[in-house]
Image (cartoon, rainbow, N blue to C red):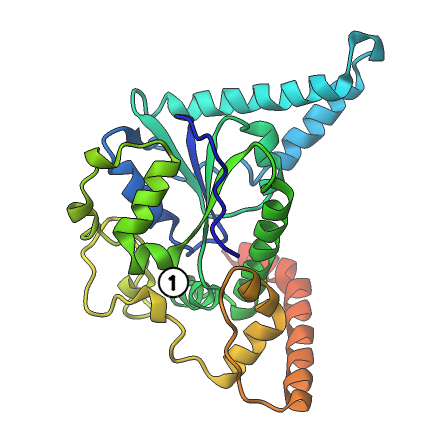
Amino acid sequence: MADQTTEGSVAGPIFIHGITPRSGTNFLSGLLRAHPDCGAPSPVWEDNLLVHAEHLERYVEAVTNSWLPEWGSISELKSELWSGLGTGLVGFLAARSAPRRVVTKTPRVLQLSHFPSLFPQALLLILVRDGRSVVESSVRSFDSFRDHAIHGWAQGAKIVREFDLAEREGPLRYRIVHYEDLVENLEPTLRGILSFLDLDADRYDFIKAQDHPVVGSSTMRKKSSDSIHWEGARADADFNPLERYAHWSRWNHARFNWVAADGLRALGYGPVDPGLSVVIDQAWNRLMDFRYRLALLLRPVRRAWRHWIA
C-alpha cells in the first residue's frame, strides 16, 4: 500500500496513530513537535481518545434515539453531535499546547473508524512499521508473549487497510507514513509530511532532526532487569531499528507469516520464506494456534492469581 494523501490540508490539529505500540510514534511526534509552530498537549503524552470511543458511540446512540423524528434529519443531527464532541476533545488538547498547534499521538489504531466522525477537520498521520520489527521490539522491551504481539500487529494492519479503503475517496485529510521511510530518508519524507500538514519547512531545522534523540527504544534495555525509559538519549552503535528481527529463526518467520502475511503485503512489506515444507508448517502453526487460544483463556486466571498474591 502506498502512502495516501488527500488534498486541501488546513491548519487543523494533528493526530498521529501508530499501527501498534512500538511503531515509532514517539519518534514521529518528536520530529513534528520540533517545528516552532507545533506543541504537545502536556501532560497528555498519549491521548487514547479513540481507543475508548465505543463509549461515545453508545452515548450518541442513546441520546439520538431519544430525539423525535419531527425535529429533522436524525442522521444529520447525529453527525453534528459526533463532531461537536470531537470539537470539545480537540479543545481539551489544544488548550495544553496553546498558542502552538497541537500534535497529539496514540500508539494504537483501535476504533480508528470513528475518527472521521469525531475529528472531520483534523489531519491524521497513520504510522505503520514492519510487523516483525514491532513484534521483536515488543518482546525485547516488555517481555511480551510473541503470539500476542503478532496477533496485535495483524489486527492493526487489518484496521489500517479497512480504514484506507473506506476513506481514500472521502474528504478526510490523512496520510499513511512508513516508519522505515523516516529512518532511511528522513529529510525528504519529513518535507512531504510537513507540506501535507501545511507547516513551513523553511522554519524547520533538518540538521538537528538528523540527530533527534531516541525515546523508548528496546535497545536501551540491555538485560532483563533493565526497564525502558522515556527520556531522550543519543543513539548508540546498537541502534538499528530496521534490523530488529535479523536473527529470527525459520519458525519465527513461519509463525508470523501464518498470522500476518496478508497485512505485510498490504502495507508494502514482503514476507520471508522460512523454507519449511507445507505439511510441517501447517502442523506446527495449528499447534501454535491452540497454544495461543489456551493462553487467551487462561489470561483472566493469571491476572486473578497475580492480584491475589500481590
Of residue 198 and residue 122, the one placed in the foreground of this image is 198
Residue 205 x, y percent position in the rendering: 18, 41
Residue 255 x, y percent position in the rendering: 57, 76
Residue 206 x, y percent position in the rendering: 20, 45
Figure quadrant of residue 303:
bottom right
Figure quadrant of residue 22:
bottom left
In the displayed structure, would residue 274 be above or below residue 45? Answer: below
User: Residue at (58%, 28%) from the top-left corner?
Assistant: 118
In the displayed structure, would residue 291 be above or below residue 210? Answer: below
User: Residue at (39%, 67%) from the top-left corner?
Assistant: 140
User: Residue at (37%, 20%) from the top-left corner?
Assistant: 95
Left or right: 272 as drawn, with respect to 67: left
Amino acid carrying label 1: it is Ser
Left or right: 4 as drawn, with respect to 66: left
Residue 253 x, y percent position in the rendering: 52, 78
- The reply to whether residue 48 is visible in this rendering is yes
Figure quadrant of residue 63:
top right
